[in-house]
Amino acid sequence: MTDTFDDKLDRAARQLAPEISPERDLWPGIAEAIEPAPRRSRWTPMLAQAAAVVLLVGASSGITYVLTAGSGVPDTQISPELVFEQASFGNDYNLGPEFQQARNGLRAELDAEMARLSPEARENIQANLDLIHQAIVEVNAALAEQPDNVVLQQKLLRAYREELTLLRRVGGLTRNVMTRNDI
């Protein structure tokens, strides 16, 4: 099959003219394509990009100015949903309602748990609570004389945090012992 096909191709190729001359002189176009094109400066693309950036920034700034200056809409002010109250320290200091609720809940839990503890543990916990309460009273007294003293304010807040931590630990002490089932 390939011999037959090759014979047909050979016959068709033999019928072609051995030399075909071009209709016109193509050499000037070929010579021009072979010669290197004149080189452009390296700076041309960078300058075009810089000009485009300047044009873009200028146009966007102009549009922004026109839209904000010509709108005539008065500036709206957003009021925050949270209201912050300045805390006052010293004898006038009142704890927030959330703190009072947390403290009262933990104190009730503590009272229920204290009955389950040994007398030595109760004495130890009560001594710690008395020490914290004494510190709170002393810091409040000092803050009454120096209400703007930041160090005293921090000490008072730390004492309240320590009280809550102690109440939380003692309240959860017997609860954690009662729920252990690996014993």
Image (cartoon, rainbow, N blue to C red):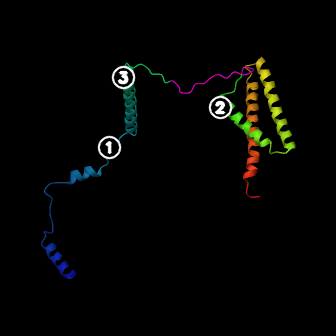
Label located before the other in sequence (1 or 3): 1
Q: Judge left or right: residue 66 versus residue 26.
A: right
Q: Please identify the dominant SS of the magenta region.
A: loop
Q: Secondary structure at mark 1?
A: loop
The percent coordinates of residue 143 (x first, y second) are 76, 21
Q: Which of the pair 75/140 is nearer the observer?
A: 140
Q: Secondary structure at mark 3?
A: helix
Which portion, as a residue range, is magenta? 79-92
The disc labelled 2 sits on which kind of residue? Glu
The percent coordinates of residue 166 (x first, y second) are 77, 38
Q: Judge left or right: residue 78 versus residue 34.
A: right
- Residue at horizontal 83 percent and vertical 32 percent from the top: 130
Query: Does residue 106 lie above or below 174 as drawn?
Result: above
Residue most extreme to the right: 120
Q: Badge 1 is on which residue?
A: 38
Quarter of image, res 157: top right
Query: Residue 66 — which label?
Result: 3
Q: Which of the pair 123/48 is nearer the observer?
A: 123
